[in-house]
């Protein structure tokens, strides 16, 4: 049987099993094992567990459960709400300041949690009710939180970037640094849109309630004294210490990414124990349980995805696909565009973890041959996968919003997120036109990449 026929069967079987509703990890593992049985030596089945173990025996992957622990420690305590409240007090006088506060809260929380759903849930549980109470539309409030939550896979430490660094065999520290510039760019774009959207809703409310402005809460002027502002600063200080400690340890060369993840987890536990009194076993139970569940789920997906990629490579499916792409002799930018469209389509159905591990063996060799910087591409790909988190039909963050704000209609949530999808697409175009947005910082800190 030709490689093309085997590849089509492999892809078709994968789509069919996933469409059945089987969990992603089990679907990938089942397809891989079946094709090992029929198309690989019989002894291959005896080494399934060994192959999975060897693929996962990476010190870099050790950082994932530790970063998840750090995020759970913040998300399962009152720390996330305190961070949001402090930012709101300082930005209350800016038009759309509450929306901007949520964007910045998501960015700061994402830089500590490294997980988009965790960021979306922690900030949204406090931010969405506050925005709606002050007259923001449900779609606007949902869109800000859903889009802000996507920053969790772009700003370091990012679990998604850890996986990309492993799959692409690139420097994790350089990749983390490369995500900072684009992450700040997205924060700026989101905040600008929040101001413009607020002004539009404010003017609409003025026209509708000209006779009695007090009937619409968005028309009320909430003011905070300087005493209130400075009184809120202590709520932010622990997060600054936590974030600074992790960044200094990582980029100062004092610790490896895995050691930094452990340091972040310890600092987060110390923070919630000393400030919020979360140290008793009954208090730590939900944090450890959440960490264990999410880590187990994610590591199982990683293990099965790596087995899936191993079978794909053994059967020469990934190599043949890469050769076919190269043989098309597309210009480098057409090649990049086609690959990004593929990632967008996959984002309709799959989470970022699966997209990276399934596509890396196929798309990275042609991109490298075309002269693209794989660190730069990792950032671009991450932003494109962020779009998948907030657009239908899957849109993981959309469903997180539905869980924490079930009174907002799904239609409003989707329409509220679409402008942010366009902003992300605009950011990708900017990165293509000005790659230094991503590459300047890692080159300054770590020197030019070795060729």
Image: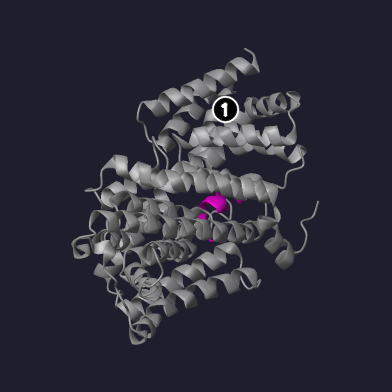
Q: Of all residues shown, which one is farthest toward the right? A: 451
Q: Which residue is drawn at 46% across and 48% down?
A: 420
Q: In this view, does 193 lie to the left or right of 273?
A: right
Q: What stretch is highlighted in magenta?
A: 156-166
The crowd level at tag 1 (other Cα within 10 Å; few <14, some 14-19, many 20+) is few
Is 92 covered by the magenta stretch?
no
Which residue is drawn at the image coordinates 39% and 37% (left, top)? 394
Q: Name the residue under label 1.
A: 43
**In the figure, residue 202 lies in which quadrant?**
bottom left
Residue 418, placed above or below residue 437: above
The x and y percentages for residue 24 are 42, 36
Where does the image place residue 213, in percent across and percent down from the top left?
Answer: 22, 63
Instruction: Please determine whether, in this image, residue 287 is positioned above or below residue 352.
Output: below
Answer with the quarter of the image where residue 41 lies: top right
Residue 63 position (above or below residue 31): below
Q: Is mark 1 on a helix, strand or loop?
A: helix
| Residue 251 placement, left or right of 357 | right
Whole-percent x, y for residue 279 in the image:
31, 75
Task: Decide if residue 53 is in sight here.
Answer: no
Residue 419 vertical placement versus 335 (above, below)? below
Q: Residue furthest top?
A: 1
Q: Is the magenta stretch mostly helix, strand or loop?
A: helix
- Of residues 73 and 324, the one drawn nearer to the viewer in this rendering: 324
Total labels drawn: 1
């Amino acid at each position: 049987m030709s490689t093309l026929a085997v590849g089509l069967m492999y892809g078709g079987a994968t789509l069919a099993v996933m469409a059945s509703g089987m969990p992603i990890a089990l679907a990938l593992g089942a397809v891989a094992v079946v094709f090992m049985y029929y198309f690989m030596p019989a002894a291959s089945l005896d080494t399934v567990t060994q192959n999975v173990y060897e693929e996962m025996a990476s010190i870099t992957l050790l950082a994932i459960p530790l970063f998840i622990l750090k995020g759970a420690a913040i998300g399962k305590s009152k720390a996330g709400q305190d961070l949001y409240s402090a930012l709101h007090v300082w930005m209350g006088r800016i038009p759309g300041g509450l929306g901007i506060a949520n964007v910045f809260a998501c960015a700061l929380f994402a830089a500590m949690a490294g997980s988009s759903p965790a960021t979306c849930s922690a900030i949204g549980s406090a931010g969405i009710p506050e925005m709606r109470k002050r007259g923001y539309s449900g779609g606007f409030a949902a869109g800000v939180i859903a889009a802000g939550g996507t920053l969790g896979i772009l700003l370091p430490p990012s679990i998604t970037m850890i996986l990309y660094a492993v799959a692409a065999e690139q420097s994790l520290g350089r990749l983390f640094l490369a995500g900072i510039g684009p992450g700040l760019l997205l924060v700026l774009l989101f905040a600008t849109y929040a101001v413009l959207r607020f002004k539009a809703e404010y003017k609409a409310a003025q026209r509708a309630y000209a006779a009695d402005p007090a009937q619409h809460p968005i028309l009320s002027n909430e003011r905070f004294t300087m005493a209130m502002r400075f009184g809120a600063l202590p709520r932010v200080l622990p997060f600054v210490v936590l974030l600074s400690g992790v960044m200094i340890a990582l980029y100062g060369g004092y610790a490896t990414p895995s050691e930094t993840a452990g340091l972040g987890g310890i600092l987060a536990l110390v923070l919630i124990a000393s400030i919020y009194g979360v140290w008793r076993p009954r208090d730590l139970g939900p944090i450890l349980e959440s960490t264990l569940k999410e880590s187990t789920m994610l590591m199982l997906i990683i293990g099965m995805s790596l087995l899936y990629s191993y079978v794909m490579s053994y059967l020469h499916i990934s190599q043949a696909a890469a050769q076919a792409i190269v043989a098309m002799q597309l210009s480098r930018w057409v090649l990049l565009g086609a690959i990004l469209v593929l990632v967008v389509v996959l984002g309709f159905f799959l989470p970022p973890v699966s997209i990276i591990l399934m596509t890396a063996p196929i798309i990275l060799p042609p991109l490298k041959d075309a002269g693209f910087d794989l660190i730069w591409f990792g950032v671009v790909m991450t932003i494109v996968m962020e779009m998948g988190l907030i657009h239908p039909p899957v849109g993981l963050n959309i469903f997180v919003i539905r869980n924490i704000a079930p009174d907002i209609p799904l239609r409003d949530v989707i329409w509220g997120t679409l402008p942010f999808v366009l902003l992300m697409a605009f950011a990708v175009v900017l990165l293509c036109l000005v790659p230094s947005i991503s590459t300047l910082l890692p080159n300054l800190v770590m020197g030019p990449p070795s060729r």
